[in-house]
Amino acid sequence: MTEPVKELNFEVVYETEGRSVGKLRNEISISWVGANEGPWEMATDEGTFHGGEDTAPPPIAYWAAGFTGCIMTQIRAFSKRMRIPINDVTVKARFAWEGHQIERNPYVTSPKGFGFDIDIDSEAPTEDIVRLVEAAKKGCFIDQTMAVANTVDHRLKIDGEWIDV
Amino acid sequence: MTEPVKELNFEVVYETEGRSVGKLRNEISISWVGANEGPWEMATDEGTFHGGEDTAPPPIAYWAAGFTGCIMTQIRAFSKRMRIPINDVTVKARFAWEGHQIERNPYVTSPKGFGFDIDIDSEAPTEDIVRLVEAAKKGCFIDQTMAVANTVDHRLKIDGEWIDV
């Protein structure tokens, strides 16, 4: 008799709550719902050139840190699970967008390119390290999200009612 | 004689550099290249339940803060540009993923749903507020990135040479 294959589905849900303060500063609480982790408090701002007061890093800096940290964490977490021993991990990443503006209209942006250079200190065979990075990509919540077109819902509160925008 | 329409294309590039420390902690420097802004230093970790040491928020918390801050910033920045006066902005957002795991294999993740509830305190007509949020979505670097399938390059350093993974 063989044991049945154990399959597990799980959900990861984060919620944020942001409040505007000052000129362009946002104060944001972040919670990992269900795991009862957080709330963590983070603030974003823009430099004075962009109309902010430079009291905190800009939003994209947080986003880029999260994306970089995600792939790095999965590499180390999965190295244990896959029994591929590694030492240090160093990652350099580049995130590029372009913007298009006509006259003084609000600009329109689009993604241009994203790339990670991953350096793993390990005695393991190359094929194991490649297998580890492949698994880390598939397990990285953010990497997997970037790879597909996502629907992001936006609801706007108008006179106490929520409307879709 | 009419003036020619002024069109402007610009690029926004961020670079990160992450180093692994401790069990699952990452220390990350983030720079806005070209704008000479940063570097900002941010650290990620995981809770002890997930094999970390709980010294910093997890990567997804930063990512979620960045996404939330991005749309909030564009709403306020564009309200000036579009001459639609607003007061406070409050945003609640929800980000959900699911994971699938077979036995003790590394799990595979996929995005499940993302949504923003936006509350803008303003005397402006509803149509102007809707127009403002529509413009903010198109100008938000992260919103625009989520809407399309992106190629994320991963290069791995093996014996001093970079290979694509």
Image (cartoon, coloured by chain):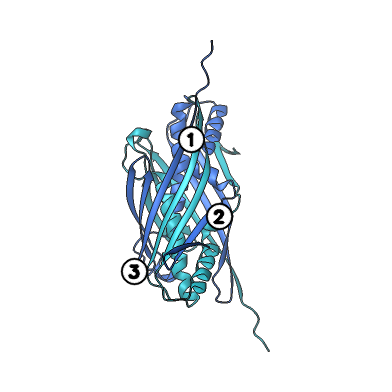
Chain colours: A blue, B cyan
Residue designated by label 2: B145
Q: Which corner quadrant of the image does residue A21 belong to?
A: bottom left
Q: Amino acid at mark 1?
A: Ile
Position of residue B13 measured from the top left corner of the image (x, y, whole percent): 52, 58
Task: Judge whether B140 appears above or below B126 on screen.
Answer: above
Q: Residues within 10 Å of mark 2 (few under 14, many from 20)?
A: many
Alpha-carbon span between mark 2 and mark 3: 27 Å
Q: Residue furthest right?
A: B1
Cα distance between the residues tagged 1 and 2: 28 Å
Residue A120, numbered label? 1
Vertical side of B90 occupied by B5: above or below: below
Whether labels 1 and 3 belong to a single chain: the reply is yes
Q: Chain of mark 3?
A: A
Of all chains, the one bearing label 2 is: B
Judge left or right: residue A103 versus residue A157: right
Above or below, A161 against B156 in this view is below
Task: Please tell me in which quadrant of the rendered image residue B31 appears.
Answer: bottom left
